[in-house]
Image (tube, rainbow, N blue to C red):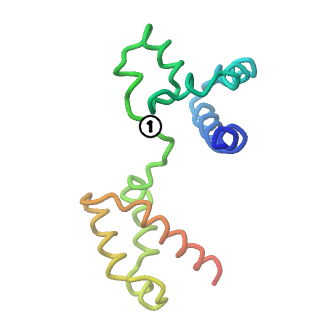
Amino acid sequence: MYAIHGSLGYLPDDILVKVDRAAMANSLETRVPFLNYRVVEFANSLPINYKIHDGVSKYLLRRVLYKYVSRKLIERPKKGFGIPIHQWLRGELREWTNDLLNPVTLSQQGYFNVPLVQQKLADHMAGKANNGYYLWDVLMFQQWLEYNK
């Protein structure tokens, strides 16, 4: 079921969009040979144990790659397409972040535990913790409130 969702939703609506934008921003043309319909049809026709074996995904592809590529490269952890929110909040969005998370304003609104938000903000800005996604959620709510006054 996930394979269907991935190929019909997540892949074209998320991953490929991000790859395309990143490539265009750098004047690159990308290719996705594993999305060729013949390759997809072949992969879909394979028995499941060729795809996942002993908990290892992409089993057949890995077996082939081991002949040509270092195991270190094949077995490394996945790297996603996450955006560097934590860096942005400490950098170019720092002033905007501090304005929206002003403790006086947050207290007057009464929606958040202000000491908790301020502690997470302070720890994040000091580099003691990566609270970027937590702060981003609060920031989006605050921006929405400001927009809908």
The quadrant of the image that shows the N terminus is top right
Residue at point 46% right, 67% down?
A: 96
Assess disc 1: are there few (<14), some (14-19) or many (≥20) residues with their C-alpha within 10 Å of its C-alpha. Answer: few
The one of 142 and 130 positioned closer to us in this rendering: 130
Residue at point 38% right, 21% down?
A: 73
Q: Is 24 on the left or on the right of 63, as rendered?
A: right
Residue placed under numbered mark 1 in the picture = 79
Q: Percent position (x, y) of residue 134?
A: 42, 65
Furthest residue in direction top, as rendered = 67
Q: Percent position (x, y) of residue 78?
A: 44, 35
Q: Percent position (x, y) of residue 28?
A: 60, 25
Quarter assignment of residue 103? bottom left
**62 shown above or below 135:** above
The one of 4 and 140 positioned closer to us in this rendering: 4
Quarter assignment of residue 86? bottom left
The one of 35 and 116 positioned closer to us in this rendering: 35
The quadrant of the image that shows the C terminus is bottom right
The one of 76 and 131 positioned closer to us in this rendering: 76
Q: Is residue 31 visible?
A: no
Residue at point 49% right, 27% down?
A: 53
Q: Percent position (x, y) of residue 13?
A: 69, 44
Is disc 1 placed on a helix, strand or loop? Answer: loop
* Residue type of the residue flagged with mark 1: Lys
Quarter assignment of residue 5? top right
Residue at point 43% right, 68% down?
A: 97
**2 shown above or below 143:** above
